[in-house]
Image (cartoon, helix red, strand yellow):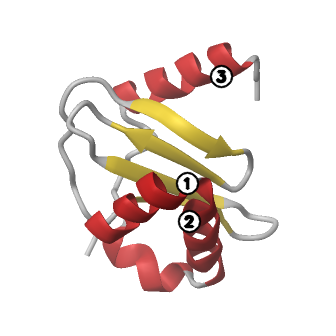
Amino acid sequence: MVMLCRWEGQMRIVAEKPWTWTLFRDDAGIYVLSTVCGGVAQYGIEMVLSPGEADAYEGVGTDSLDALAQEVSRNPAAYTGRAIEGFIGRAEVKDAIVRWRAQSGRSD
């Protein structure tokens, strides 16, 4: 099952490991992890962090996201049930990406 989600307020990027994962957060504190998967043909899986995953990020930091993203990338089929359909194509997400890249000096 693919998830459809609604967001509260503005979506923003709060952390990133380029070409591996990006962490988004809305004004209500919901975290969405976008993980790069695949080899030659790359694609992303975007999913809402569970309360435990969010707690791990807030407690341990990005090391917890590195581990989770590695797990998702190695076994994407296990996470497709948590995938958010059309997340990256949403206007508020595109705006968050543009703001993050401008802020960080990235153009890719």
- The residue at the point 47 percent across, 25 percent down is 96
- Report x, y in % for residue 44: 56, 58
Q: Nearer the viewer, residue 93 or 67?
A: 67
What residue is rendered at 21% in x and 25% in y?
9
Asked if residue 48 can be seen in this view, the reply is no
Among numbered discs 3 and 2, the one appearing first in the sequence = 2
Horizontally, is 107 left or right of 34 in the view? right
The span from disc 3 to disc 2 (Cα, nearest Å) is 23 Å
Under mark 1, the amino acid is: Gly
| Mark 2 in CB contact with mark 1 (< 8 angstroms) | yes
Residue at the (65%, 82%) spot, across then down:
74
Mark nearest the camera among 3 and 1 is 1
Task: Work out which quarter of the rendered image holds the C terminus and state it.
Answer: top right
Would residue 105 be found to the left or right of residue 63 on screen? right
Which residue is farthest right? 40
Q: Secondary structure at mark 1?
A: loop
Residue 72 image position (x, y, % from top left):
56, 75
Is residue 101 depicted above or below 58 in this figure? Answer: above
Kind of element beneath mark 2: helix
Q: Are marks 3 and 2 in contact (CB under 8 Å)?
A: no
**Quadrant in the picture for residue 51:** bottom left
Q: Which quadrant of the structure image shows residue 36?
A: bottom right
What is the number of the mark on residue 101? 3
Whole-percent x and y of residue 11?
35, 30
Q: How many marks?
A: 3
**Crowd tier of the residue under label 3, counting other residues whose Cα lies within 10 Å: few below 14, some 14–19, many 20 or above:** some
Q: Which residue is mark 1?
A: 61
**Residue of label 2:** 64
Secondary structure beneath dot 3 equals helix
Looking at this view, is 41 or 63 the one in front? Answer: 63
